[in-house]
Image (tube, coloured by chain):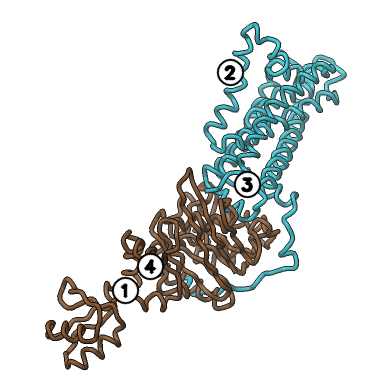
Chain colours: A brown, B cyan
């Protein structure tokens, strides 16, 4: 269990994390989404005891991270894949962590295999690693102590599509066996397919939080008909808010079902009916993080 | 990279999962970190080679002291000059290479890590000291001696004072690394600051300070003779200021600062 309770952090008078609260429960994957500079990393650092909050409390497994006697055995942390000594060999970096935690050094070899770093890669110095290899090494490092929870900052950075898929499977499996996963990303599609819950942060404040389905439920639908004029009349008759879409048809603030019923009542043939803006969460994410959406939500909340 | 089997095998939880890593283990980890990087490894190799060269040079020199003492004191300059650089890097690289993120995630009590680094530094100094004595001892039979009976003599005061010098300079390196948290300034200032102060102390009205804090003056007698009470006071004051001040600043910065 990972809990952020009203966490607040200021840097030189600027509030970069502002009253952030959320809870990550065992058995679930929570995606922590936000644009670069939104306050994700600072929040994760406070959770891992690496930055001191100016307000609020960071709780992991019911206590403060710094109070854990041997944290590596409970929480796997990957805050920056590039934070490895460039002159140290990959396997050696894991061996150092294993020794610190008091874990058998053979576990390092198991994990290298698990993350797909072969013998030759493991013997190379980190300087020669690609970003994707560093992410794999970082993930191996986080899993080394066989933890119950994972805190991962942008673990998908630098992974190729097969690598992303592999990581999703790994984290899904980890959560399905009762593990707690909190991972951040600035790329929505990385998180969309994996996360059970999504927390969206913008300018240091949480602007949306919920299960994936809850967040998707509020999003718009694109509808295109053979006859746009009849469709407009149908939507008006059903009291649905619609605005013309750039390439024909309408973007409607409603569920596809409601639009379908309105079209049926007016006997309009629909040619397209889908979440607006490609993937629904993506539109939501852009709305929220590109300024006006965030303001809108804040006003609504106030 | 064909690891599609996304399972985590063998849950290796043992009974000691909850025990805090002991200072001995953490010191062993830090000792390992001093030598397992490319920079650390080659620095150490360089120091060993330089020490050997100095011993051999002493053996072949026409003049000078060819006793065990003579063959050991001068070559010891190699480790006591360059070993502290390994100490500096042991701390500063955690910041410049950003491994502090990993280190302090695993050991959140940061001053325990700093203590472990100091113990590791002391251990490496002891090892270097013993190695230098052994090298000198091996060289003794090869050196020419005008009939002397004391070629194997190694006075206790000399061992004690030289060991103290080596260990304190190592800890001072670690302290500088901690105070600056950046490799280049820490290394440069470690070497330049004492020289700068020495130059400053030549101004006559600062002379009374030099008697206490100029390392070139207060620590030099350590290789020469057993220190007197006053000399110990001077040497102690010098070590205190050069060691305690950076160490205090460093401990404060490490304990308080956010790690990024």
> Pointer 3 and pointer 4: residues touching (CB < 8 Å)?
no
Instruction: Answer left or right for B92 relative to A301.
Output: right
**SS at mark 4?**
helix
Chain of the residue displaying label 1: A
> Which residue is identified by label 2?
B196
Q: Are marks 2 and 3 on the same chain?
A: yes
Dividing the picture into quadrants, the one containing residue A230 is bottom left
Judged from this view, the residue extending furthest toward the top is: B204
Label placed on residue A279: 1
> Which residue is identified by label 3?
B33
Give the residue at x 80% y 20%: B232
Numbered disc in front, either 4 or 1: 4
Q: CA distance from mark 3 to mark 1?
A: 47 Å
Q: Residues within 10 Å of mark 1 (few under 14, many from 20)?
A: some
Q: CA distance from mark 2 to mark 3?
A: 32 Å
Give the residue at x 58% y 18%: B196
Q: Is residue A114 visible?
A: no
Q: CA distance from mark 2 to mark 4?
A: 64 Å
Q: Are marks 2 and 1 on the same chain?
A: no
């Amino acid at each position: 269990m990972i809990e952020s309770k009203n966490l607040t952090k200021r840097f030189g008078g600027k509030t970069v994390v502002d009253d952030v609260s959320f809870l990550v429960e065992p058995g679930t994957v929570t995606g922590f989404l936000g644009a670069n500079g939104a306050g994700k990393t600072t929040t994760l650092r406070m959770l891992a005891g690496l930055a001191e909050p100016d307000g609020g409390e960071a709780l992991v497994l019911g206590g403060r991270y710094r109070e854990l006697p041997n944290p590596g055995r409970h929480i796997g942390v990957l805050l920056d894949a590039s934070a490895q000594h460039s002159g140290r060999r990959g396997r050696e970096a894991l061996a150092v962590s294993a020794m610190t935690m008091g874990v058998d050094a053979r576990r390092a070899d198991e994990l290298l295999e698990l993350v797909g770093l072969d013998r030759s890669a493991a013997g190379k110095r980190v300087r020669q690693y690609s970003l994707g290899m560093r992410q794999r090494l970082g993930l191996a490092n986080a899993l080394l102590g066989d933890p119950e929870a994972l805190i991962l900052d942008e673990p998908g950075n630098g992974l190729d599509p097969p690598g992303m898929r592999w990581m999703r499977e790994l984290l899904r499996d980890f959560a399905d066996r009762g593990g707690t996963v909190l991972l951040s990303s600035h790329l929505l599609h990385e998180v969309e397919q994996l996360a059970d819950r999504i927390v969206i942060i913008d300018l240091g404040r949480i602007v949306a939080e919920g299960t994936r389905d809850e967040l998707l439920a509020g999003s718009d639908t694109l509808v295109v008909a053979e006859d746009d004029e009849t469709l407009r009349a149908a939507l008006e008759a059903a009291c649905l808010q619609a605005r013309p879409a750039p390439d024909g048809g309408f973007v409607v603030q409603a569920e596809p079902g409601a639009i379908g019923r309105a079209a049926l009542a007016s006997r309009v043939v629909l040619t397209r009916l889908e979440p607006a803006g490609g993937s629904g969460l993506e539109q939501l994410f852009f709305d929220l993080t590109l300024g006006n959406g965030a303001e809108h939500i804040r006003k609504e909340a106030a | 990279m064909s690891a599609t089997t996304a399972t985590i095998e063998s849950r290796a939880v043992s009974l000691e999962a909850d025990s805090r890593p002991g200072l001995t283990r953490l010191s062993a980890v830090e000792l390992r970190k001093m030598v397992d990087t490319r920079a650390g490894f080659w620095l150490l190799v360089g120091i060993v080679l330089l020490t050997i060269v100095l011993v051999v040079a002493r053996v072949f020199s026409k003049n000078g002291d060819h006793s065990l003492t003579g063959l050991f004191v001068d070559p010891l300059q190699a480790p006591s000059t360059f070993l502290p650089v390994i100490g500096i890097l042991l701390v500063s690289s955690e910041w410049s290479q950003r491994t502090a993120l990993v280190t302090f995630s695993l050991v959140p009590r940061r001053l325990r890590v700093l203590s472990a680094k100091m113990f590791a530094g002391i251990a490496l100094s002891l090892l270097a000291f013993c190695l230098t004595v052994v090298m000198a001892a091996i060289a003794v039979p090869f050196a020419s001696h005008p009939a002397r009976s004391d070629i194997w003599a190694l006075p206790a005061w000399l061992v004690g004072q030289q060991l103290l010098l080596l260990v304190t300079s190592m800890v001072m390196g670690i302290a500088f690394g901690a105070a600056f948290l950046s490799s280049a300034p820490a290394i440069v200032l470690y070497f330049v600051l004492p020289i700068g102060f020495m130059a400053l102390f030549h101004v006559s009205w600062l002379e009374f300070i030099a008697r206490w804090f100029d390392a070139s003056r207060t620590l030099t007698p350590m290789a020469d003779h057993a220190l007197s009470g006053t000399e110990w006071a001077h040497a102690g004051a010098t070590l205190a200021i050069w060691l305690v001040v950076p160490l205090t600043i460093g401990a404060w910065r490490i304990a308080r600062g956010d790690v990024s």
